[in-house]
Image: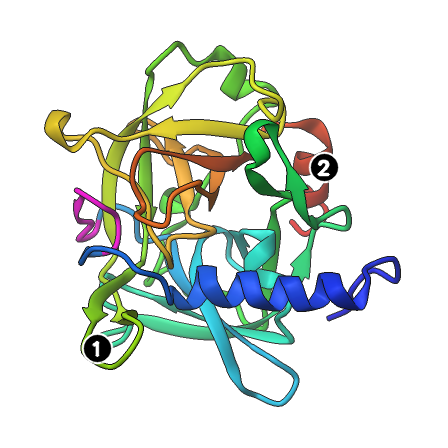
């Protein structure tokens, strides 16, 4: 893995800190199980996998979620891949206790990824937050059928969505909050969950790059939490990936959050270069 020569040492330290927070989940949060207010995915989205990342010394540095879009390519978030030297992906509803398949791969991060950049209101986001993992071996079709692969959208697909259009979330998150040992922290991977949330159509400063999403548990809507980063935001009822779970303004994993759009020409061209 390489980091852009223009990235300062302080920026690298910041990246390490933020990725550790986002991927390790060491934050004060209520107990939750993966996708908030969701349900076990069972066999609903077998192409969605857990993405574990390691440094050049072989040390585990975090995990996220991703989607198989070809036999050898997993789509995930740039802030998941940016510090990774190599990656191991796990398929299955419960990848810790009963993985259906695991494979190694090489991470690639969108060349224009950087962090942090600030949106209106001082909210920090990950510019160019997309990454891919090129697997060393193809995932067998007996594990993930080609019919279940995540599909790339047409350019501008997000712009066609109406206000509060339903979209589907899928991902793995931490599912146990450990307390009584100092600062609370999350432990153990979650089971693959899915949920439906609302797309919020608004002309905020980063709307050309991010989807704004909202979940309301009282209306059976879900949300994302730590470990869901890189998981797909799907056009409702389909395998078409509109965005990638990216970041949110709340440590409590509720209210609104943002997904990085993959329906722009530069991003689609970059992803397609690996297919």
Q: Quadrant of the N terminus?
A: bottom right
- Image point (28%, 78%), residue name: 182
Query: Which element carries disc 1, helix, strand or loop?
Result: loop
Residue marked by disc 2: 269
| Of the pair 263 and 163, the residue shown nearer to us | 163
Residue marked by disc 1: 97
Query: Which element carries disc 2, helix, strand or loop?
Result: helix
- Image point (56%, 19%), residue name: 204
Q: Mark 2–mark 1 contact, CB under 8 Å?
A: no
How far across and how far down the image is residue 226, in percent? 37, 56
Residue 216 position (above or below residue 187): above
Q: How far apart are marks 2 and 1 (CA)?
A: 37 Å
Residue 271 within the magenta-colored segment of the rendering: no
Which residues lie in the magenta part?
34-43
| Of the pair 163 and 254, the residue shown nearer to us | 254
Quarter where residue 23 is shown: bottom left
- Answer few, some or many: residues within 10 Å of disc 1's Cα (few below 14, many 20 plus, some between 14 and 19): few
How far across and how far down the image is residue 144, in percent? 36, 56
- Image point (55%, 61%), residue name: 18
How far across and how far down the image is residue 162, in percent? 40, 9
Q: In screen coordinates, is 96 left or right of 226?
A: left
């Amino acid at each position: 893995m390489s980091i852009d020569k223009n990235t300062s040492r302080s920026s690298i330290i910041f990246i390490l800190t933020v990725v550790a927070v986002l991927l390790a989940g060491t934050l004060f949060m209520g107990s939750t199980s993966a996708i908030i207010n969701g349900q076990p995915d069972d066999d609903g989205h077998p192409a969605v996998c857990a993405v574990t990342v390691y440094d050049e010394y072989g040390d585990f540095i975090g995990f996220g979620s991703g989607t198989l879009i070809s036999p050898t390519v997993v789509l995930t978030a740039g802030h998941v891949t940016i510090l990774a030297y190599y990656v191991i992906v796990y398929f299955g509803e419960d990848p810790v206790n009963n993985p259906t398949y695991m494979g190694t791969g090489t991470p690639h991060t969108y060349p224009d990824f950087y962090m942090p950049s600030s949106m209106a209101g001082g909210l920090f986001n990950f510019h160019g937050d997309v990454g891919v993992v090129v697997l060393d071996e193809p995932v067998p079709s007996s594990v993930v059928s080609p019919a279940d692969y995540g599909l790339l959208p047409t350019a501008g697909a997000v712009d066609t969505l109406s206000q509060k259009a339903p979209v589907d979330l899928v991902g793995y998150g931490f599912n146990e909050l450990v307390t009584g040992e100092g600062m609370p922290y999350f432990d153990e991977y979650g089971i693959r969950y899915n949920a439906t949330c609302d797309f919020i159509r608004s002309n905020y400063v980063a709307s050309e790059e991010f989807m704004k999403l909202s979940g309301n548990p009282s209306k059976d809507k879900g949300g994302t939490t730590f470990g869901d980063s890189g998981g797909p935001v799907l056009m409702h009822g389909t395998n078409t990936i509109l965005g990638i779970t990216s970041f949110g303004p709340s440590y409590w994993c509720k209210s609104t959050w943002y997904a990085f759009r993959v329906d722009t020409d530069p991003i689609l061209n970059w992803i397609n270069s690996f297919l």
